[in-house]
Image: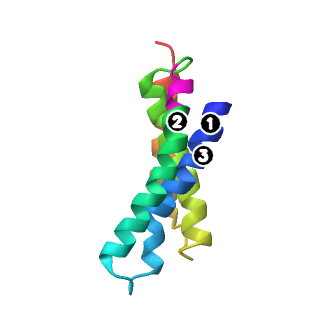
């Protein structure tokens, strides 16, 4: 559970670092890059421990697919609440297909 919580916090920072500047298109590029890098540093402060802790129980591939699912969940909330964009049905279908990958990565064959 600790890994999932840390990855979720990490992804909130990552999403703001990658997409938060889209609301500030009038700002100079160097400023948004600098702010994004500062936010990304905070993201790494959660992501690195999450993967270190998680690798004791999960494989690297399992950690990666877990990260992708968390990223999509965080992004959906961010996109709707912060960017005020709607989630279209085809986006949700695409996200659902990625969720299907979780089955194959976590299934013991």
Mark 1 or 2 closer to N-term? Answer: 1
Find the magenta span and give its range: 50-55
- Label 1 sits on a secondary structure element that is helix
Which mark is drawn over residue 28?
none
Residue 82 pos. (x, y %): 58, 72
Marks 3 and 2 close (CB-CB < 8 Å): no
Q: Is residue 5 magenta?
A: no
- Give residue 79's quadrant in the image: bottom right
Q: Which residue is mark 2?
A: 66
The one nearer the camera, 81 or 94, is: 81
Q: CA distance from mark 3 to mark 1?
A: 6 Å
Q: Which residue is mark 3?
A: 8
Evaluate whether residue 16 shows in this view: yes
- Residue density around tag 2, few if under 14, some if 14–19, many if 20 or more, within 10 Å: many
Mark 3 or 2 closer to N-term? Answer: 3
**Residue under the point 50% across and 14% down:** 108
Which mark is drawn over residue 4?
1
Tag nearer the camera, 3 or 2: 3
Evaluate whether residue 90 shows in this view: no
Classify residue 77 as left or right of residue 108: right
Q: Is residue 109 above or below residue 9?
A: above
Q: CA distance from mark 1 to mark 2?
A: 8 Å
- Label 2 sits on a secondary structure element that is helix
Q: Residue furthest bottom?
A: 26
Q: Where does the N terminus fall, quadrant-wise?
A: top right
Residue 80 pos. (x, y %): 59, 70
- Give residue 26's quadrant in the image: bottom left
How many numbered marks does the figure carry? 3
Marks 3 and 1 close (CB-CB < 8 Å): yes
Marks 1 and 2 close (CB-CB < 8 Å): yes
Residue 23 pos. (x, y %): 47, 79
């Amino acid at each position: 559970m600790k890994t999932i919580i840390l990855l979720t916090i990490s992804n909130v920072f990552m999403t703001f670092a990658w997409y938060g500047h889209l609301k500030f298109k009038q700002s100079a590029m160097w400023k948004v890059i600098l702010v994004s890098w500062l936010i990304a540093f905070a993201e790494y402060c959660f992501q690195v421990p999450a993967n270190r802790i998680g690798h004791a129980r999960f494989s690297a591939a399992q950690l990666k697919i877990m990260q992708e699912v968390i990223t999509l969940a965080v992004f959906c909330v961010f996109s709707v609440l912060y960017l005020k964009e709607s989630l279209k049905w085809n986006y949700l279908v695409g996200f659902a297909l990625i969720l299907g990958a979780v089955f194959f990565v976590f299934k013991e064959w």
